[in-house]
Image (tube, grey):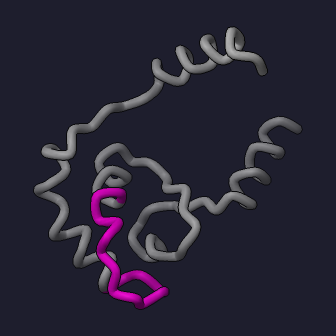
Amino acid sequence: MKRPELLGVLDDLADVLTVVPVAALEPMFARCEETLRDAAPSRNGSVRAAHVLALAWSVEADVWATDRDFAGTGVATWSTPNLMRGFAEVGAG
């Protein structure tokens, strides 16, 4: 796609985006940190993604991630390979 074609795509994308202020998520951070510490199969204790988990919970969204930190948190996660397979299935159907 060339730049002029991308403008329409970006406009369409902007129409479906939900902007959530970080301040609205802050009350959830402690619970998200606890969930990440206790539920992640990686067991690395990292809570750096608490803001991502809070956002996913607040808008009922999936997460595109390269690690397993969100497993067991109640949020569906997508890796690049399974995301591409999902797109291919939708395109084929």
**Height in image: 72 above or below 87?**
below
**Height in image: 78 above or below 61?**
below
Quadrant in the rendering for residue 74 = bottom left
Quadrant in the rendering for residue 12 = top right
Residue 78 place in picture, x, y as percent = 60, 59
Residue 93 place in picture, x, y as percent = 85, 36
Which residue, as the protein is rendered here, is positioned at the far bottom?
43
Quadrant in the rendering for residue 75 = bottom left
**Height in image: 93 above or below 43?**
above
In the picture, measured across the screen, residue 6 lies left or right of residue 24, that is: right
Report the predominant secondary structure element of the magenta stretch: loop
Which residue, as the protein is rendered here, is positioned at the far right?
92
User: Looking at the image, which residue is at 51% across and 61% down?
Assistant: 76
In the picture, measured across the screen, residue 42 lies left or right of residue 19, that is: right
In the picture, measured across the screen, residue 91 lies left or right of residue 16, that is: right
Residue 3 place in picture, x, y as percent = 69, 15
User: Looking at the image, which residue is at 19% across and 69% down?
Assistant: 31
**Height in image: 50 above or below 61?**
below
Stretch in magenta: 38-52
User: Looking at the image, which residue is at 39% across and 48% down?
Assistant: 60
In the picture, measured across the screen, residue 70 lies left or right of residue 12, that is: left
User: Looking at the image, which residue is at 78% across and 21% down?
Assistant: 1
Is 8 contained in the magenta span?
A: no
